[in-house]
Image (cartoon, rainbow, N blue to C red):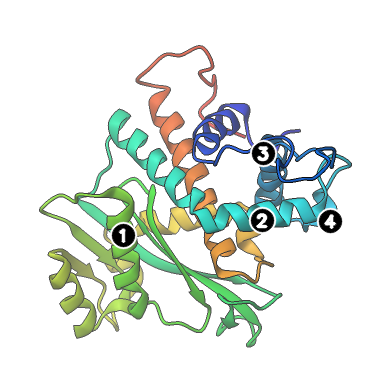
Amino acid sequence: MPAVPSCLLESLWDQFAALLPARQGYAPSHPLGCHRRRVPDRVVFEHIVLALVYGSGYERISSPGCSDRTIRRRVRQWAELGVAERVHALALEAYDRMIGLELGEIAVDGCITKAPSDGEKAGRSPVDRGKQGLKRSVASEGRGVPVGLVSAGANRHDSPLLGPTLQAAKDQIGAMPKDVNVNLDRGYDSANSRALLGEFGFTGEIARKGIPAPVQAGKRWVIERTHSWMNGYGKLRRCTEKNGRTVDFYLYLAATLVTLRALIREARNRYRWDARPTTRRLK
């Protein structure tokens, strides 16, 4: 059973491989030219997808042709190159070209997950008895496609992460429309948040403190669904990575898969292609 459907895996790999630097099978600097052949990037990539989906340690998903050290070393290299961020930007560009991003309404919210191995992006979780946790702040467009992500310790409040999250969305998308309304929950109900939205040139619909949430849910419910989509990946539910760049690598890789799923789900009713899925749900 594959970790993700082939229509997702092949589409992601085509763009992912194009961003990787060209390397020879053997290192030309080796004096004898007969050392062990380099593990192909495609093999390592499939193991990384397994780690992302199931959340398993590298030792458990390693194989005779790809050791856990190779996976860990290649993940670190690709994270330093920012490949996941760039492939996510390409996925957003494809979605915008074929379906159209609804950037008039943006929702932002944070989500706390487990980070038992500590690390650069971990902090004491206020909802898990002070254990180490990870917070991700995500901005989604009107349909719930993630457009900007920021990671931080679980002890960070949502409000200070609003600016970096909106800036990350602008960096991924590029030019934003003139009229953008940002939907936020009561955790962002402060003068600083409103001033920050004004600096970006956005308007804001912020839930007021002291009023029941169902009464003022508004258009920010889509971000809750986006977080549930991203929590479907085991590496995000229980992040064991210590390096901050590696954490962001897996966050953006998961966001890319979420974007591709949304793209195929919307495109199957508008376009026809040979590998078009026959069901709405991509298992």
Amino acid type, callout 3: Asp
* C-alpha gap between disc 3 and disc 4: 18 Å
Above or below, 91 relative to 51? above
Amino acid type, callout 4: Glu
Tag nearer the camera, 1 or 4:
4
Provide the residue designation for mark 3. Answer: 41
Q: Quadrant of residue 238?
A: bottom right
Q: Is residue 175 left or right of residue 266?
A: left
Q: Is residue 240 left or right of residue 8?
A: right
Q: Earlier in the sequence, mark 3 or mark 2?
A: 3
User: Foreground: 23 or 190?
Assistant: 23
Q: Residue at x 76, y 33 (%)?
A: 1
Q: Residue at x 54, y 21 (%)?
A: 277
Provide the residue designation for mark 4. Answer: 59
In what element is the residue under mark 3? helix
Badge 2 density bin: few <14, some 14–19, many ≥20, Cα 10 Å: some
